[in-house]
Amino acid sequence: MIPISSAAVTARIAAELPTYRWITKFSRGRWLVRIWEWGDCRSYDYTGDTEARALKAAFDATLAFERARQRRLACPYCKGLGWYIVTGGDKEMCRHPQVAA
């Protein structure tokens, strides 16, 4: 297994997810990372046996969520909303894969 450093992961988070903030904390023998985006009403928690692994778990999950959000935003029908109005005023659910927010 290739060792990862928390400084390297922190630099990647800052570079690829510039609007996100995080805190790390050592609690009960595990590292806890809380990550959130400015304006979010909640944070997302990730744990690991080292600080670097907890940061990497947070980074990987958050990056996957951001990529899914960008794919939804590119939808020509709903523009990421998940539904759109059809002729006659009815609400139609979009066919792209839904991702929980």
Image (tube, rainbow, N blue to C red):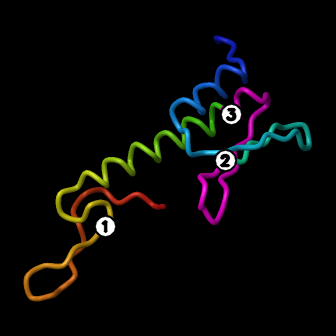
Whether residue 66 is in magenta: the answer is no
At 18% from the left and 63% from the top, the residue drawn is: 77
Residue 78 vertical position relative to residue 2 in the rendered view, above or below = below
Please state if 28 lies on the left or on the right of 39 as rendered.
Answer: right
SS label for mark 1: loop
Tell me the residue that label 3 is attached to. Answer: 55
Query: Who is closer to the viewer here, 13 or 94?
Result: 13
- Is 13 positioned to the left or the right of 32 in the image? left
Residue placed farthest to the top in the image?
A: 2
How far apart are the alpha carbons under marks 2 and 1?
Answer: 25 Å
Q: Alpha-carbon neighbours of circle 3 within 10 Å: few (<14), some, or many (≥20)?
A: many
The residues tagged by marks 1 and 3 sit, at their Cα atoms, a distance apart of 30 Å
Of the 4 image quadrants, the one containing the N terminus is top right
First in sequence, mark 1 or 3: give its number: 3
Compare marks 2 and 3 and give the one earlier in the sequence: 2
Q: Which residues are magenta?
A: 36-55
x then y, percent, for residue 28: 91, 43
Extreme-left residue of the structure: 87
Q: Residue 35: which numbered mark, if any?
A: 2
Give the x, y percent position of residue 69.
39, 51
- Inspect the image, locate mark 3, and give the three-letter code of the amino acid beneath it: Leu
Q: Name the disc covering residue 82, or none.
A: 1
Residue 22's x, y, as percent? 70, 43
> Quick one: SS at disc 2?
strand
Mark 2: few, some, or many residues within 10 Å (few <14, many ≥20)?
A: many
